[in-house]
Image: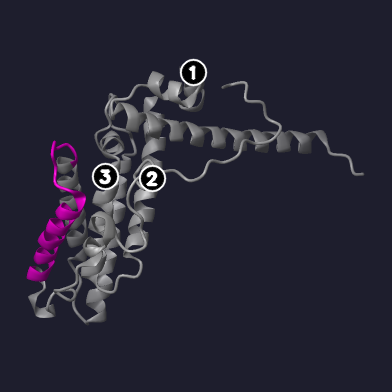
């Protein structure tokens, strides 16, 4: 049987420890999302640690400060939003359907987890803006995505597409600003109703700047807002467990590593 060198053994131990730390950080982000949902966007590190079943000292062992934890939570939420939006627009046949599906899905996620949304967007408890702002980064990425959709459709019709970047980012700004205001309202409109209104508003603007193209799709297309359960797009479930705080199945602990830090 070949002998394992000391260097190889050390490398394996280091790899296992790094995997353990990644798993533990993911578990702590899960706990942070649950704590935000339970206590609101101004949740404290003590409350997060308590819900994680650990101490604040251990929490700071994995995250240098609240800003680092905020960035980890925001990154998780950003991935969730992008994944849901891509799923929502898959299978749509016109830009209007894609727009309706994306707006309905975004508002559904905000409605399901308003505390998480406000934690990410408003960054309560942080003394300064992070050097890398995940909210601006997500908005820019979504704006580029919408611009690509419009550009693809226009070029397929042989139309010019010089301003699609501005349009895409403008549409994202419209939806984000509306969602930000709406999420903080008492007795707010249901997500499905607001989604229909924002789709009509955004679509009317696009159709107005492209009259020679006859708009960007069939006027009667209703997209995701005509689906079941508060206008969720076909194939994307609504209801509990599908909000911003939803996380994938937990990763099993790494065998052979003690959980003394808990």
In the rendered structure, which segment of residues is drawn in magenta?
183-208
Q: Quadrant of the N terminus?
A: top right
Q: Residue at x 53, y 41 (%)?
A: 250
The residue that disc 2 covers is: 241
How far from the left and from the top, in percent, is residue 258?
66, 26
Q: How many marks?
A: 3
Which marked residue is nearer to the observer: mark 3 or mark 2?
2
Please determine whether, in this image, residue 194 is positioned above or below residue 65.
below
Please rate how many residues cluster around mark 2, counting C-alpha atoms within 10 Å: few if below 14, some from 14 to 19, many from 20: few
The answer to whether one can see residue 143 in this image is no
Q: Residue at x 29, y 43 (%)?
A: 112
Q: Is residue 211 left or right of residue 145?
A: left
**Circle 3 sits in a helix, a strand or a loop, which is it?**
helix
Q: Residue furthest front?
A: 229
The residue that disc 1 covers is: 55
Q: Quadrant of residue 117?
A: top left
Q: Is residue 257 left or right of residue 53?
A: right
How far from the left and from the top, in percent, is residue 41?
28, 30
How far from the left and from the top, in percent, is residue 124?
27, 28
Q: Residue at x 20, y 65 (%)?
A: 164
Label placed on residue 110? 3
Q: CA distance from mark 3 to mark 2?
A: 13 Å
Q: CA distance from mark 1 to mark 2?
A: 27 Å
**Circle 2 sits in a helix, a strand or a loop, which is it?**
loop
User: Of the residues under marks 1 and 3, which one precedes in the sequence?
Assistant: 1
């Amino acid at each position: 049987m070949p002998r394992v060198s000391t260097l190889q053994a050390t490398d394996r131990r280091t790899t296992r420890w790094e995997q353990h730390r990644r798993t533990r950080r993911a578990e702590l982000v899960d706990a942070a999302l649950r704590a935000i949902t339970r206590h609101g966007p101004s949740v404290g590190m003590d409350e997060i640690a308590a819900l994680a079943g650990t101490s604040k000292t251990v929490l700071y062992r994995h995250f240098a400060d609240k800003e680092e934890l905020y960035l980890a939570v925001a990154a998780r939420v950003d991935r969730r939003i992008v994944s849901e939006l891509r799923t929502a627009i898959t299978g749509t046949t016109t830009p209007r359907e894609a727009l309706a599906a994306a707006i309905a899905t975004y508002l559904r996620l905000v409605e399901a987890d308003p505390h998480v949304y406000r934690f990410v967007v408003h960054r309560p408890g942080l003394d300064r803006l992070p050097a890398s702002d995940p909210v601006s980064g997500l908005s820019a990425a979504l704006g580029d995505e919408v611009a690509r959709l419009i550009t693809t459709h226009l070029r397929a019709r042989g139309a010019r597409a010089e301003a699609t970047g501005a349009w895409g980012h403008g549409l994202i700004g419209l939806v984000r600003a509306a969602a930000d205001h709406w999420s903080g309202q008492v007795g707010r409109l249901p997500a499905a109703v607001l989604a229909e209104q924002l789709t009509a508003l955004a679509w009317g603007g696009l159709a107005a700047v492209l009259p020679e193209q006859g708009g960007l799709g069939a006027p009667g297309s209703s997209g995701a807002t005509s689906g079941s359960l508060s206008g969720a797009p076909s194939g994307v479930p609504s209801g509990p467990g599908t909000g911003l705080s939803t996380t994938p199945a937990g990763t099993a602990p790494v065998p052979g590593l003690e959980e003394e830090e808990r």
